[in-house]
Amino acid sequence: MIVPQEIAETVVDPKAYADGRIHEAYRWLRRNAPFAKIAPAGYDPFWIVTRQADIMAVEVQSDLFCNSQGLPAITSNEMRAQLGDRPGGFRTIVSMDGVEHQAYRRLTQGALMPKTLRILEGRIREIARVFIEKMAQTGGRCDFAQDVAFLYPLRVVMEVLGVSEKDEAFWLTLTQAGNTQNSKGTHAQMDDTARAEAMKQYLTGLNNYFVDIITDRRANPREDMATRIANGEIKGELIGNMEAMGYYIIFASAGHDTTSASTAGGMAALAGDPEQFRKLKDNPVLIPGYVEESIRWVAPVKHFARTVTADTEFNGQQLAKGERLMLCFASGTRDEDAFTDPDRFDIERSPNRHVGFGYGPHLCLGQHLAKLEMRIFWEELLPRLQNVELDGPVIHPETTSIAGPQSVPIKFVMS
Ligand code: HEM
């Protein structure tokens, strides 16, 4: 079926992600044209994939639908002209395929498995307590997204990497260079050219900082992720500086806003639903399920892109080499064929197998860390939180990339 142009425009309209129209568009697409070619103004035509099963099917065929060509997200022609295919010259695992991709993943994968992460639990708990205390200090009213959820995951990622807390401002700039989930919302106000310029500026300014870290960790190895990356070897050779930098950047940027967004969205859902809040507070065993549901519900990574490597037929459609696909994770996680009552936030949803972390060879490398830090946060907060309710409208940012609620005003009582 031909997709109405209005729906095609909605898919790339940042405002539709803020006011919720995107979910109507996704719903229409899932029902009527789940695997369709669209051409919003200013974009080359691309395929939009909205059902969870189709997203998974594309992801597992990574030789046919690759990551190494083109940017990780669908961009306007203007933005692409500004950025080129590899902004800043860094290479990250998101833009690798096949054997090389697996080799780079293996450098950190072991350290991000649940068993290994257990060593970090105590330290993450301390960080969580600091932010929960900050929340308590607000005296019962705060913007949970900005005052609590925004910085906690950055602090955790910095701890895991092993970089100093005093560099927080630098890392904040880094993780905010490409999107809108920042406290001032500055990027949300920019047009494509300005946003591309801001991104390039940040990316090119990073060189010295990272070269210092790489040199230091090669000379003085420590028990941290920065050391593991700087000393990573592939086929017996140290990885290049650009690859090490790319790893730090993807680690921090992929690990920050995503987890902030899911934590903020989880709070927004609870504060609006006293019954589920009470149930969760009284039954801490439900916390892991609640965390999973927060991630499905928010699906902070709205989409990623793939490129077709050879002319092929897929899902009854003729796809040409070089065409791009938009994998809409935020639609897959609300797919009526995969979830009962998908628009309902349900802390006891089971099963809850969703594509919020992606799927296949590029499945989120940090998923266990994200779930661990969120679980710890709620384990620490819930015993102290006597009640909570929304204190104003929940505001979502205008962006088609990574986002969750930007503002979650709450009123609460804490012990
Ligand atoms: C709730 C939090 C998070 C969500 C929802 C999330 C989601 C995602 C998604 C959708 C992808 C793309 C997967 C695909 O293409 O199939 C991804 C990739 C990735 N994520 Fe996460 N992520 C989260 C937290 C983290 C954290 C905490 C880290 C690390 C500190 C991290 C590191 C990465 C990396 C390195 C990749 C690239 C993997 C690859 O290309 O092989 N993420 N994530």
Image (cartoon, rainbow, N blue to C red):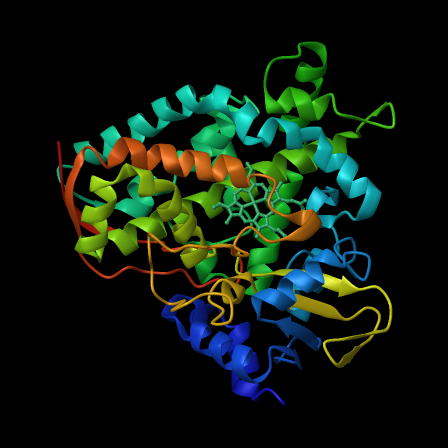
- Is residue 71 something that shows in the picture? yes
Give the quarter of the image for residue 367: top right
Relative to 393, 51 lies left or right? right
Image location of residue 256, percent across then percent down: 48, 41
Q: Quadrant of the N terminus?
A: bottom right
Give the quarter of the image for residue 152: top left
Residue plotted at (17% across, 54% down): 274
Observer-nearest of 273 and 165 = 273
Q: Is the residue 42 above or below the residue 134 in the image?
A: below
Q: Is the residue 87 above or below the residue 283 in the image?
A: below
Relative to 271, 211 lies left or right? right
- Is residue 75 something that shows in the picture? no
Image location of residue 228, percent across then percent down: 67, 22
Q: Quadrant of the C terminus?
A: top left
Residue plotted at (33% across, 52% down): 347
Q: Residue furthest front?
A: 351
Observer-nearest of 336 and 98 = 336
Image location of residue 404, percent across then percent down: 41, 55
Q: If the picture is divided into quarters, which one holds ligand 1? A: top right
Relative to 357, 345 lies left or right? left
Residue plotted at (77% across, 42% down): 101
Give the quarter of the image for residue 303: bottom right
